Amino acid sequence: MKTDTILLDHGSGGKISHRLITDLMLPIFDNPMLAALHDGATLDIDGNRFALSTDTFVVDPIFFPGGSIGDLAVNGTVNDLAMCGAKPLYLSVGLIIEEGFSMTDLKKILKCMGIASEKAGVKVV
């Protein structure tokens, strides 16, 4: 890697993200599912096939024309699962919220997530 610190670009999903995964993560977490470099993994458990994806989003601004970080979180994860050939049914949500963040903005983001999950036909669990 060419940098000693994490840049915002490391989370953008582009070439720098790819290098972070291939140069740093793959040597440590070496397994065929990660090595496939897909946005999700498909798992066979007791004869049943499941798809799994975890994603995080950092955008500035958090509200933008046509959506918000909440819309992006749901739709981005649903898209990752669909790209694995799965029919997305459920999502889990993890939030990292800075102290002092507006409760009003958090409620708006969660409402956007609720609308997006309803449109996508997935339940947040």
Image (spheres, helix red, strand yellow):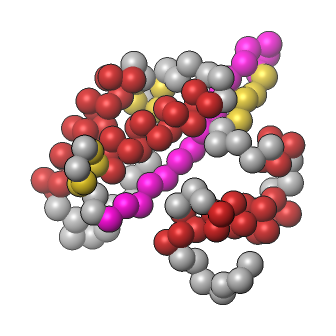
At x 39% / y 53%, what residue is drawn?
95
Looking at the image, residue 50 lies above or below residue 21: above
Residue 124 placement, left or right of 99: right
Taking depth in this image into account, of 41 and 93 the one nearest to the observer is 41
Residue 79, horizontal then vertical, whole percent: 52, 33
Residue 123, horizontal then vertical, whole percent: 40, 24
Taking depth in this image into account, of 12 and 116 the one nearest to the observer is 12
Our reading of the magenta stretch's main secondary structure is loop
Taking depth in this image into account, of 14 and 90 the one nearest to the observer is 14
Q: Which residues are magenta?
A: 45-60
Taking depth in this image into account, of 14 and 123 the one nearest to the observer is 14
Residue 64 placement, left or right of 57: left
Q: Quadrant of residue 23?
A: bottom right
Residue 120, horizontal then vertical, whole percent: 39, 23
Quadrant containing the C terminus in the rendered view = top left
Find out whether residue 68 is within the magenta segment: no
Q: How many marks?
A: 0
Residue 53 placement, left or right of 18: left
Looking at the image, residue 95 lies above or below residue 87: below
At x 32% / y 65%, what residue is drawn?
60
Q: Quadrant of residue 87?
A: top right
Q: Quadrant of residue 81?
A: top right
Residue 66, horizontal then vertical, whole percent: 25, 44
At x 75% / y 28%, what residue is drawn?
43
At x 74% / y 78%, what residue is drawn?
1
Residue 103 placement, left or right of 13: left
